[in-house]
Amino acid sequence: PMTIPRHSARHALKREGVRFVVAGAANTALSYSIYWALLPWLPYAYAYTVSFMVTVLTGYALTSRWVFRVRWSWSRLAAYPVIHALNYGLGLAIIWLAVEVLRVDAIWAPLLAAACSVPVSFVLSRWLLLT
């Protein structure tokens, strides 16, 4: 059987990582825009929840097709939100900690959540879409 050289596998992982960060930045910008738009009318936890739910779908589209270059499937789409429920909990906990304990303005708290949850999201997304 043909094997992929170790350096090629690392290079592919690096390319996936770069595409993941770019796609994630675009999706985060969308999420943040929705969050900001809702914040005047909703408590921060609800604004975050709505923005998270919308961007799970855009995140799946970007991650499956562009980052990992796999075909869309209904089973993966159904599992994607389940996998990201952990990421949601992590993000909400970080936002709560930032706002309630560290007294960070609720407008900026999602940036901390995103910075902490990106590595978790990459690992979970890669596992879901490539296994």
Image (cartoon, grey):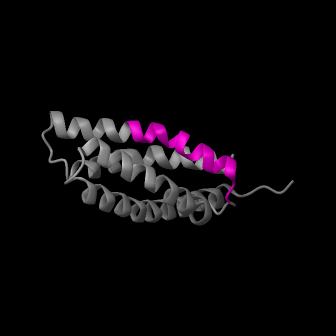
Q: Which of 104 and 42 is in front in this view?
A: 42
The residue at the far right in this view is 1
Q: Which x, y percent locates residue 103?
A: 12, 40
Residue at 65% of width from left, 48% of height from top? 76
Q: Which image quadrant: the C terminus?
A: top right
Give left or right: position of 1 versus 104: right
Q: Which of 49 and 16 is in front in this view?
A: 49
Give left or right: position of 118 versus 2: left
Q: Which of 98 and 19 is in front in this view?
A: 98
- Among the 4 quarters of the image, the one containing residue 10: bottom right
Give left or right: position of 105 versus 27: left
Residue at 39% of width from left, 36% of height from top? 89
Tell me if residue 50 is in the magenta stretch.
no
The residue at the far front in this view is 41
Q: Which x, y percent locates residue 2?
A: 83, 57
The residues colored magenta run 72-89
Residue at 41% of width from left, 41% of height from top? 88
- Among the 4 quarters of the image, the one containing residue 4: bottom right
Give left or right: position of 126 versus 95: right
Q: Which x, y percent locates residue 6?
A: 66, 55
